[in-house]
Image (tube, rainbow, N blue to C red):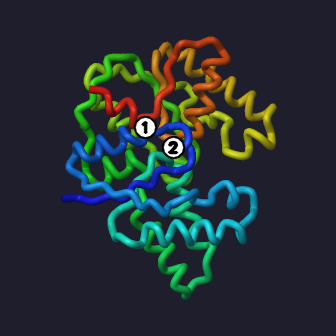
Amino acid sequence: MPKAQLFITCLGDQFYTTTLQNMTHILERLGVDVSFPSEQTCCGQPLFNNGFEEKTRPVALNFLRAFSKSDAPIVAPSGSCVSMVKHHYAELFKEGTPEHALAVDIASRTYEFTEYLVNVLKVTDVGAVYPHKVTYHASCHYLREMGLKTEAKTLLNQVKGLEFVQLKEEETCCGFGGAFTVTYPEVSRSMMENKVKDIVASGADTVVMCEPGCLMNVAGGLHKAGSHIRAMHIIDLLSSQ
């Protein structure tokens, strides 16, 4: 039986608990033995992205210690948080130290949810049913830092009843960018409004993505625009039966 440790992320824990429950249910339905390291906290990405490497280090070390108690893969519902662990943790610690070696090990077995399903479990059909017209927003870290271009759409294409509609600007940023939306609110708002217009123009009744931050931003933009298009995390769509 395959095993996996759940890395739930901050936004998941605070705002998308149903998504986390659905992630657990899908993995268990696929025969994965899931566990939850209770010592986990933030991965440190907000601190790191704002240049506070010294303050990021103890947060990262706590994460590494929490997930080092098992050698099982680590699975999360966020491309940006996974990218932080995979691509930036090792540079926080001096090469040749136990901490650096641990960071390299943890990075090698940390996966975004759709990546884990398609590339590790080799699963593309989870038995989901969703008879709606659906479009997809490619989140920046998921696409650019993680290099995940086909995994989410591979899963969507196997959902029964789903009609897929591609966005004209699928790979254009939605404007969230974590602290970017606070530091440059006018630019962020303009980017978000352009993304919303693209989604509305697609004719879809649902837009999905693999990133809680983008989901929060896009859902808010659609609501502000008076649109009834539903914004969903891909995990929630894949849990539909």
Which residue position holds label 1?
19
x, y percentage for residue 145?
Answer: 55, 54
Give the residue drawn at x 25%, y 53%. 32
Q: Classify residue 25 as left or right of residue 39.
A: left
x, y percentage for residue 20?
Answer: 42, 42
Give the residue drawn at x 62%, y 18%. 223
Which residue position holds label 2?
12
Of pointers 1 and 2, the one earlier in the residue sequence? 2
What amino acid is labelled 1 in the image?
Thr
x, y percentage for residue 124?
Answer: 27, 41
User: Element under label 2?
Assistant: helix
x, y percentage for residue 166?
Answer: 46, 25
Q: CA distance from mark 1 to mark 2?
A: 7 Å
From the viewer's side, name the closer residue of 137 and 99: 99
The residue carrying pointer 2 sits among few (fewer than 14), some (14 to 19) or many (20 or more) residues within 10 Å by Cα, namely some
Q: Residue 184, located in which quarter of the rendered image?
A: top right
Q: Would you say the residues marked 1 and 2 are in contact, meaning their CB atoms lie under 8 Å apart? A: yes
Q: Classify residue 236 as left or right of residue 83.
A: left
What amino acid is labelled 2 in the image?
Gly
The residue carrying pointer 1 sits among few (fewer than 14), some (14 to 19) or many (20 or more) residues within 10 Å by Cα, namely many
Which mark, residue 239? Answer: none
Give the residue drawn at x 26%, y 26%. 241
Q: Residue 75, located in which quarter of the rendered image?
A: bottom left
Q: Residue furthest bottom?
A: 96
Total labels drawn? 2
Q: Residue 240, located in which quarter of the rendered image?
A: top left
Q: Residue furthest front?
A: 38
User: Element under label 1?
Assistant: helix
Q: Is residue 197 above or below residue 157?
A: above
Give the residue drawn at x 43%, y 37%. 19
Q: Classify residue 105 as left or right of residue 34.
A: right
